[in-house]
Image: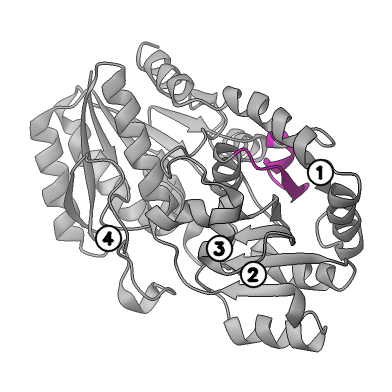
Amino acid sequence: MNVIIIGTAYPLRGGIAHYVALLAKYFQKAKHHVEIISFKRQYPKILFPGKTQEESGEELFSIKAEMLIDSINPFNWISVGNEIRKRKPDLIVFKYWLPFFGPSYGTIAAIAKHNKHTKVLMICDNIIPHEKRPGDSLFTKYIFHFADSAIVQSDSVENDLLTLFPKLPYRKIPHPVYEIFGESIPQSEARKKIGITETENVILFFGYVRAYKGLDVLLHTMKNVENITALIVGEFYDNEKQYRSLAKELNVENKVRFFSEYIANDEVKNYFSACDAVVLPYKTATQSGIAQIAFNFDKPVITTNVGGLAEIVPDGKAGFVVEPNNPEQLATAISKFFSENKKEEFTEQVKIEKKKYSWENLVKAMEELMVR
């Protein structure tokens, strides 16, 4: 099968780029021919909340992408659609996470399908986004009008798909584990690299900081725990000063360490290897790639019961699941993790759980949808 994957790819940064690289790798392992088409302009600078859209670290897989798509230029969409139409792939896979890309994706798909051969599959991180904007519904309906099938990765996204597009063939396959960041390093070595002691009890909040991810909840939580250090690691897409002021107001500055920058691919292992558990205090979610990075490094996860997160983390086995927006309950779970020495027990269960989340299963589901 000839496959074109459309989505963010290196040298652009972030979890979508990591996902696309791994998906391409496993399509190749399944003996399919794969091409990646990415963005020469993903977001206009005025709409991008981060410092840079490009990866500062090493490329972790050498699957080259063509940087062709300009997300805000309709003439470009027509050109890219015609180019793909001529190549006549069996399948175009769109990695879809934001309605902003609906117009460009939809136009490319519409033109490419004029060859009467190519099918379109949507991998749906979100269908209804966390942070709603005008035009979301219209843009989403536009691209899904040209979809032949879809992959969803959590119950909540499945429900959204069935509500909006009930006749679209789909498979629900859990988000695979992010194995792109390499192996763990010894905890003592990792802690030395980032400047924390070997004796600390350490939890990790990792990734872009946005309001829905609940960092404010975690800071309130830290007021109710003792002898625990929280690493806050990632670039702020929200007001950083607001969170630092909150930490000061709550008098938890000595319990939190801010690493407020994007973490390059080759440095991610340092933070996951250094921590004892990963904490996801999200207020809303569909699924989280952070949980799948945690599982890659055999780290237990303490999460809130939103979206598909509780589907990934069996409560009391591979971590704890608490209600969202509840600092007291989250504090109890974190304290219990350390006071009852759950780390070893939960780590062993994580090693079992993560076997469910394979890229081979995802590729197989796409192959099955192609022969419907």
- Sequence-first disc among 1 and 4: 4
- Sequence-first disc among 3 and 4: 4
Image position, residue 8 (x, y; %): 32, 51
Cα separation, mark 1 vs mark 4, equals: 40 Å
In the image, the segment drawn in magenta is: 298-312
Residue to which mark 1 is pinned: 320
* C-beta proximity under 8 Å, tags 2 and 1: no
Cα separation, mark 2 vs mark 4, equals: 25 Å
Q: How many marks?
A: 4
- Which of label 2 and label 1 is nearer to you? 1
- Which of label 2 and label 4 is nearer to you? 2
**Which residue is at 58% across, 23% downward?**
355
Q: Is residue 219 magenta?
A: no
SS type, badge 2:
helix
Looking at the rendered structure, the kind of residue marked 1 is Phe
Image quadrant assignment for residue 369: top left
- Which of label 3 and label 4 is nearer to you? 3
Name the mark on residue 71.
Answer: 4
Residue 51 visible (yes or no): yes
Residue to which mark 2 is pinned: 211
Residue to which mark 3 is pinned: 192
- Sequence-first disc among 3 and 1: 3
211 relative position to 135: left or right? right
Tell me: residue 41, above or below residue 345: below
